[in-house]
Amino acid sequence: MAEGVSALSNGLRAYGLIAAMWMRSTMTYRASFVMTAFGNFAATAFDFVAILLMFSHVDALGGYSLPEIAFLYGAAGTSFGLADLVMGSMDRLGRRVRDGTLDTLLVRPVPVLAQVAADRFALRRLGRITQGLLVLGYGLLVLDIDWTPLRVLMLPLMVLSGAAIFSAVFVVGAAFQFVAQDASEVQNSFTYGGNTLLQYPPTIFAKDLVRGVTYVVPLAFVNWLPALYVLGRPYPLDLPQWPAFLSPAVAAVCCGLAGLAWRVGLRSYRSTGS
């Protein structure tokens, strides 16, 4: 137990040092940082612009109004933005495995996961988080929600748990690249693709897909289940309300499984042989 806590502490410290190094490098050229962050903000904003264009022709999408979808969109976007900021570099692992540069990380007295996750830490990704928060704020301001202490508590739990779940998916996808080596697009289908999926209400998707992201890859716990509880909406699978409170537990299980998958993948690595 003590060794595990010590390893976690060392990993977090190493991650912080590497990320700080990249942030100092980024802020050396502040005008470039502002432009790239704004570009990231604008690029992600086009997703919501597409939703606005839809609502210029319809009053509801899957039975949900624009503010309700803005709430779903903002919650998913903020959670994913946080995960992308912290773990978004994991999709480069396949390239390191192919060209052998992962070997240079293995000889350092620092956890490999911390090195890979913090590599090229991109502060510009704050643009995605900002955009998600703005849309989430719009949804919260416009919606007429019957606020209770539990609903208020659900908001930060939903965003943070969602970020942890997405982070776990990033790590599992990276672990798969130890075997597949060129599987970044497979990883992106569950991370970036999952974020896009969760921006829309579950009622527009087939029930088999909704079951899959509820019971198999539990992305529904990122925002669908907790957000529908806040909105007072029933879940398409006729689940009771209490699973909405399981997001932190689901996030913890996902992170545990991701850590196990990472250890298995790392142990299977055999270098390039050169």
Image (cartoon, rainbow, N blue to C red):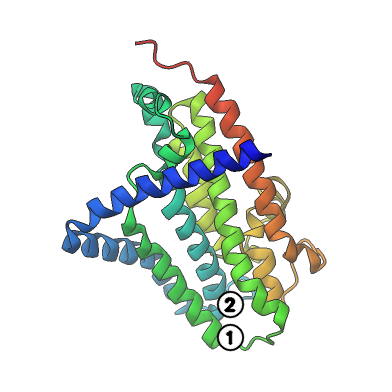
Q: Secondary structure at mark 1?
A: loop
Which amino acid type corresponds to the residue marked 1 in the rendered image?
Leu
Instruction: Measure the alpha-carbon separation of dots 2 and 1.
Output: 7 Å
Residue at image x 17%, y 57%?
Answer: 29
Looking at the rendered image, the quarter that the C terminus falls into is top left
Q: Residue furthest top?
A: 273
Residue at image x 66%, y 42%?
Answer: 256
Looking at the rendered image, the quarter that the N terminus falls into is top right
What is the quadrant of residue 33 in the picture?
A: bottom left
Decide if residue 28 is on the left or right side of residue 158: left
Residue 23: x and y in percent read 29, 54
Question: Which sits in the foreground, 13 or 143?
Answer: 13
> Where 4 falls versus 152 (above or below)?
above
What is the quadrant of residue 228 in the picture?
A: bottom right
Q: Which mark is residue 245?
A: none
Q: What residue does disc 1 label?
A: 143
Is residue 55 among the parts visible in the rendering?
Answer: yes
Residue 113: x and y in percent read 48, 37
Q: What residue does disc 2 label?
A: 68
Residue 98: x and y in percent read 38, 23
> Where 141 falls versus 232 (above or below)?
below
